[in-house]
Image (cartoon, rainbow, N blue to C red):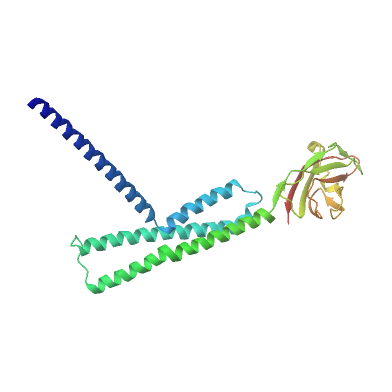
Amino acid sequence: MSGGRQHGTVTQAHTITNTNTQSHNTTTTTTNLWFDLSQAASVSPGAWLLGLELLGLGAAAWFWPGGPLSQYAVFGILCASALATAGWSVVIARSGNDEGRADQDSADGGDGEPMDAAQRLARERMAKRRRLLARVALPVTSVLFAVAGLLAFQHVVATGEIPTEVRIRGSQLLQGPRSTPLTLVVPAPEEPREKLRLELTLADYDDSTGTCVHKTTATVTAATPGVTPNRKEMTAEDTVDFDLGGNKGPLRFQVTVRTEANCTMRLAKATGTLHN
């Protein structure tokens, strides 16, 4: 009988021990979670801004409309300013925290010399200015730079230059005073613009027979109604701007090349750029 009672007592003690252990583990987990959340909440605003701005740059890269990099100069300057001010805010916040811990150690009798009241007051004022700079002034400035950068990017998306495909149809044996016209087709753009900059380059069909580039001209005629100018005379290597007159569909142009009777030319390059 006494042996049975002793076994029951051991089992009950083991159960109580397990319950205490589970309670201790739950308390520890809750404490660690609360510590992690408090640490996340104490991160400086500059760190949050830095992360959000980097995400914004990733989104801009994903929706990048293309075109010459020069038109993104303002956007790049504003983005760099936003990142720099946010990063500066993080650096100041961290240095302020490090100095605060050092001052506390000194006041508690650490390795450093204890501060008198005047020194402590000066340090507190400096720390207050640092907090104001790190948590208000620099983050607000960074937000203003970021918003301005977003507006600049949207402006480029809406009005910036976009390279467009130009398809050449017809025979490339361009001979004599008036060759058979070529047809240039510009597909309907995804992002319509007001104007088209068309660049043509005429080259010798056979370079070994001498050059006729300086003897060659071209007439570009707009076959799409509403495009102006309707006709434009060009040299062998020239650029012309067409006002699209609100056209948002495909565009067609005819190119007639004029050269000497013994010359054979080809349209080596035709590039287009949509812009406002």
Q: Position of residue 34 (x, y in %)?
A: 33, 50
Which residue is painted at 37% across and 60% down in the image? Answer: 93
Q: Residue furthest bottom?
A: 118
Q: Position of residue 194 (x, y in %)?
A: 76, 55
Q: Quadrant of the N terminus?
A: top left
**Relative to 69, 264 lies left or right:** right
Q: Residue furthest front?
A: 1
Residue 31 versus residue 19 in the image, above or below: below
Count of marks, rendered view: 0
Q: Quadrant of the C terminus?
A: bottom right
**Relative to 192, 64 lies left or right:** left
Which residue is painted at 80% across and 36% down in the image? Answer: 206
Which residue is painted at 40% across and 67% down in the image? Answer: 132
Q: Quadrant of residue 266?
A: top right
Which residue is painted at 61% across and 58% down in the image? Answer: 152
Residue 117 versus residue 89 in the image, above or below: below
Give 221 or 4, whichever is nearer the viewer. Answer: 4
Q: Quadrant of residue 5?
A: top left
Q: Position of residue 14 (x, y in %)?
A: 18, 33
